[in-house]
Amino acid sequence: MQMLKQRSGVRAAQPGRRTVQVRAVAAPVKAPSSKAIITPEVAKDLYYDMVLGREFEEMCAQMYYRGKMFGFVHLYSGQEAVSTGVCRLLRQDDYVVSTYRDHVHALSKGVPAREVMAELFGKKTGCCRGQGGSMHMFSSKHGLLGGYAFIGEGIPVGLGAAFQSKYRHDVLGDEKADSVTCSFFGDGTCNVGQFYESLNMAALYKLPHIFVVENNLWAIGMSHLRATASTAGDNDPHIYKKGPAFGMPGVLVDGMDVLKVRQVAQEAIERARRGEGPTLIEAETYRFRGHSLADPDELRSKEEKAKWAARDPIPQLKKYMLEHGLASEADIKALEDKVAEVVEDSVKFADESPKPEKGQLLENVFADPRGFGISEDGLYRYMQPGFSSGTAIVS
């Protein structure tokens, strides 16, 4: 399949819409202007991960409009600094809980691009064997505990993962049980009950849990300023200030700057591993597309979108890397070329992968297969010939 080659910072055009160029002008390699706060290896990892997230999502848009994906697809373009800044600090045994905007969280946590794209195509080789789709990525191997379509429902799951870590360490005496859980969610979720219940429980038991609010200012088409009451003494609502009310640190960070996100996340992760409890992080960010690919994105002003597009986190990191001697133009091009190959390969793999067999629908429904009931001949339905292949009559 011939794909359209893209480069980081360039957003794919939607039908009837003008392509928006947000790539920064390439700067020549300079001697370090000041001491860099990251190593060249870390810088390249961060850049690669953010570009992978962007290019993967833009390819998803192409595949969606070509009819390769179905249902609602919510893209993460613009918010990469949050996922990369947090997830690239995590170990494989740490956990991540996501939302319906979960593709990039999966990639940042290490789920192969092939498995994520195949899942979006509904193929058997996907990370959920084609049954999860866009909004329900899951990989136990990589500590990805799922994307959740309903807002707020993933946070208690994250708390459960954090609780088991705490229990294994404090009660069962497993000193190696110091895994951390990060739950990602948006500003709209901060107005539902599960959020506050989870803040309370996390603080009560000092759970190794990090609440990461990706405040992109819009809950579908509802402005954050219209949906959330102002915090005491402020003209505007500040979600991070809800943390201290529950006895945990609340931190506000520029979610368009991956280095700032990384710094804040590192402090929160280390604090959690030391057994000092949860942290609430509010990352101010912005999505460059509508709520989903079915959203015409007419409620946000052109001025607002242009303002945030100018703060694209990918060119910002590229500029930093060049100015501090962390990478050359050739290094960066090599990373971008590698991303292009990975994304192209993921589409080819997904397109050529087989669809799930019908019998797969009958799996993982009941812990005990006898739950399918008894047929007219008196035998359990799961014992009928052809049951596992989906050809048995089960009506």
Image (cartoon, helix red, strand yellow):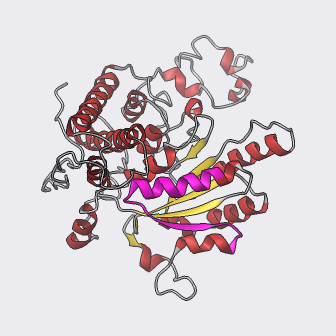
Find residue 35 and report its horizontal and vertical position in percent. Answer: 39, 52
Nearer to me, 314 or 394? 314
Nearer to me, 320 or 165? 320
* Residue 326 in the image: above or below residue 199: above
Question: Does the magenta run of residues contain 349?
Answer: no
Question: Does the magenta run of residues contain 269?
Answer: yes
Q: How many marks?
A: 0
| Left or right, 204 with reference to 187 | right
Residue drawn at x 70%, y 70% as measured from the top left: 246
Tell me the quarter of the picture where residue 307 sits: bottom left
Residue drawn at x 61%, y 73% as measured from the top left: 242
| Left or right, 184 with reference to 68 | right
* Residue 54 in the image: above or below residue 252: above
* Residue 88 in the image: above or below residue 354: below
| Left or right, 182 with reference to 207 | left
Res. 155 visible in picture:
no
Tell me the quarter of the picture where residue 240 sits: bottom right
Find residue 260 and report its horizontal and vertical position in percent. Answer: 44, 58
Residue drawn at x 50%, y 42% as measured from the top left: 136
Magenta-drawn segment: 245-270
Where is the C terminus found, in terms of image quarters?
A: top right
Find residue 193 and report its horizontal and vertical position in percent. Answer: 64, 67
Find residue 353 and report its horizontal and vertical position in percent. Answer: 36, 20
Residue drawn at x 22%, y 36% as measured from the top left: 333
Where is the N terminus found, in terms of image quarters?
A: top left
* Residue 166 in the image: above or below residue 130: below
| Left or right, 193 with reference to 390 | right
Res. 223 visible in picture:
yes
